[in-house]
Image: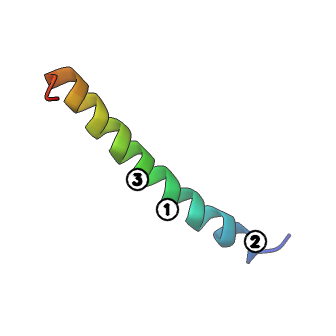
Amino acid sequence: MTTISFPSIFVPLVGLLFPAIAMASLFLLVQKNKIV
């Protein structure tokens, strides 16, 4: 089992997942408040 393979997949996953959650929550807040 390669130890180097795990971080190389885990780091971009978090790097893409975290902003995606932030964008989704921000989008939901805007939709909820209806600030167009």
Q: Amino acid at mark 3?
A: Pro
Q: Quadrant of the C terminus?
A: top left
Q: Amino acid at mark 1?
A: Gly
Location of residue 5 by image quarter:
bottom right
Alpha-carbon neighbours of circle 3 within 10 Å: few (<14), some, or many (≥20)? few
Q: Tell me the CA gap for discs 3 and 2.
A: 23 Å
Q: Relative to 25, does residue 8 appear above or below in the rendering?
A: below
Q: Earlier in the sequence, mark 3 or mark 2?
A: 2
Nearer to me, 35 or 23: 35
Q: Which element carries disc 2, helix, strand or loop?
A: helix
* Tag 2 residue: 5
Q: Which element carries disc 1, helix, strand or loop?
A: helix
Residue 35 horizontal/vertical position (percent): 13, 28
Residue 12 horizontal/vertical position (percent): 58, 64
Q: Is residue 26 left or right of residue 4?
A: left
Residue that sits furthest to the front in the current view? 36
Residue 10 horizontal/vertical position (percent): 62, 63
Alpha-carbon neighbours of circle 1 within 10 Å: few (<14), some, or many (≥20)? few
Nearer to me, 22 or 27: 27
| Mark number, residue 15 | 1
Residue that sits furthest to the bottom in the current view? 4
Nearer to me, 1 or 19: 19
Q: Tell me the CA gap for discs 2 and 1.
A: 16 Å
Contact, mark 3 vs mark 1 (Cβ under 8 Å): yes
Q: Which element carries disc 3, helix, strand or loop?
A: helix
Q: Tell me the CA gap for discs 3 and 1.
A: 7 Å
* Tag 3 residue: 19
Q: Earlier in the sequence, mark 2 or mark 1?
A: 2
| Mark number, residue 31 | none
Residue that sits furthest to the right in the current view? 1
